[in-house]
Amino acid sequence: MDQAAPRGTRDILPPESGIWQQLEERFDDICQRYGYGEIRLPSFEHTEVFARGVGDSSDIVRKEMYTFDDRAGRSLTLRPEGTAGVARAFVQHGLSSEAYPVKLYYRMNLFRYEAVQKGRQREFNQFGAECFGSADPAVDAEVIGLVDRFLAELGLTAVRLELNSIGCPDCRSNYHETLRDWLRPRIASFCPDCQQRFEMNPLRILDCKVPEDQARLHDAPLLFDGLDPDCRAHFERVTELLDAQGIRYQINPRIVRGLDYYSRTVFEFISENVGTQGTICGGGRYDGLVAALGGGEVPGCGFAMGVERLLMELEAQSCLPSLPARSRLYLASLDRAAQTAAAGLADRLRQEGITTCSDLVGRSLRAQMKYAARSGFSHVIVLGSDELASGSGRLRRLSDGAEEEVRLDADAIRSRLDPRTAD
Ligand code: ATP
Ligand code: MG
């Protein structure tokens, strides 16, 4: 049997999982401060949800999905992104009848069959949020503001925000023709993927990852230059609101985003450090998505942030969240009666919120002390017949060996371990 996890997947063990928990808590907290409620979704959907919701011409649907038939012959797909599933749930649960805007956030694992490299896995995680029901540019600015605030609260500085508008379907169909005309005499020199995109959705070519193709595109016509007046006014209002919040951005007319359902505002938060995998977060407005999934005309706007890439960036900028320093007590025991007493005392201490472990292996005292020191315990009490008889023992702090006498009851021990919670 192959003992390694499948290629492109990763196990997260302690203490790293503690850092994940911290990030998750902070993301929950900021979303709740912005009025978002958490949505939890199934890990797989009917394939059609993504084919329609992400778009047939996207890289995700064309070549990255884990699609399979279940035993009853239904085509299912492990979710490659979050927004289509959230919109599916929005339609299914009739959320369009709730007071607008409807604000939902999520934390989820995702699956894409990709070329594995640093910051690019086959199972990865995103934090995201979606706001449904308002076409007002105030939504776009608040969604961007949430991400900006989150990154600032984590202490990240070297991240830049790039902003663009890809207009409405009308702007795009005009532009498709302009772009096709420009590409037609040049397309033979582009990569095979781009040749397919030329037919399906030429806008996708602007998003090609092949550096030579990017270079060839430097003087291609820009959609941004041909936005219709409504789309231009929308974009200008977004920038006005960002300016008012003091959020800095660069306009980058080449951002198109990988999914088909975007309209108008698109944005990315990009690391100043990491190279090609430097996009930490992407998002934008998707006014046609809910309708594409069989709901009504409900506008939406949201973002998705890659958690693994966020962690890489936090590490690069030396701002990984630190784990809270907590006391951890080990109750060593000299004999069977003491082991029994230790188990009872440990139970009472845990009810008081104190991390407590006792011997589960039947080890010698020496071996127990070695275990406690190696496993990160901060304090030890050794229990034997004397301690059981007197009802008190010596609390030893492992960092410096300091000892003090303490009564063997939960309140007394708690007050010695953490003076802040003393009665
Ligand atoms: P890229 O251009 O890097 O392929 P994308 O446009 O496919 O990104 P989105 O679908 O917008 O990415 O997902 C939002 C975020 O999720 C990305 O900005 C990135 O941080 C993260 N992400 C996307 N794909 C992966 C992956 N395979 N492994 C790890 N993180 C990923
Ligand atoms: Mg991708």
Image (tube, rainbow, N blue to C red):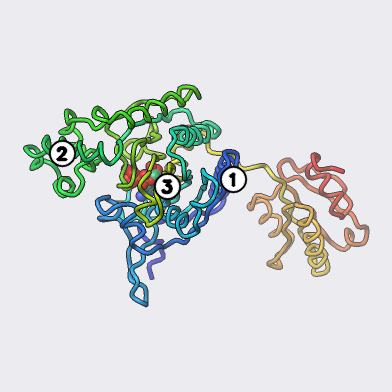
Q: In the rendered structure, which amino acid carries the disc numbered 1?
A: Glu
Residue 361 x %, y %: 68, 67
User: In this image, 195 relative to 99: left or right?
Assistant: left
Q: In which quarter of the image is residue 227?
A: top left
Secondary structure at badge 3 equals loop
For the question of whether residue 118 can be seen, the reply is no
Residue 63 sits above or below residue 219 on the image:
below
> Gap between marks 2 and 3, in whole Å?
28 Å
Which is nearer the N-term, disc 1 or disc 3? Answer: 1
Residue matched to label 2:
177
Q: In the rendered structure, which amino acid carries the disc numbered 2?
A: Glu
Badge 3 density bin: few <14, some 14–19, many ≥20, Cα 10 Å: some
Badge 2 density bin: few <14, some 14–19, many ≥20, Cα 10 Å: few
Which is nearer the N-term, disc 1 or disc 2? Answer: 1
Secondary structure at badge 2 equals helix
Q: Residue 316 carries which label?
A: none
Residue 110 x %, y %: 41, 55
Which quadrant would the C terminus be assigned to in this image? top right
Residue matched to label 1:
25
Which quadrant would the N terminus be assigned to in this image? bottom left
User: In this image, 36 relative to 10: left or right?
Assistant: right
Of residues 176 and 299, the one drawn nearer to the viewer in this rendering: 299
Badge 1 density bin: few <14, some 14–19, many ≥20, Cα 10 Å: few
> Gap between marks 1 and 3, in whole Å?
30 Å
Indicate which label's residue lies in the foreground, 1 or 2. Answer: 2
Indicate which label's residue lies in the foreground, 1 or 3. Answer: 3
Residue matched to label 3:
298
Of residues 227 and 324, the one drawn nearer to the viewer in this rendering: 227
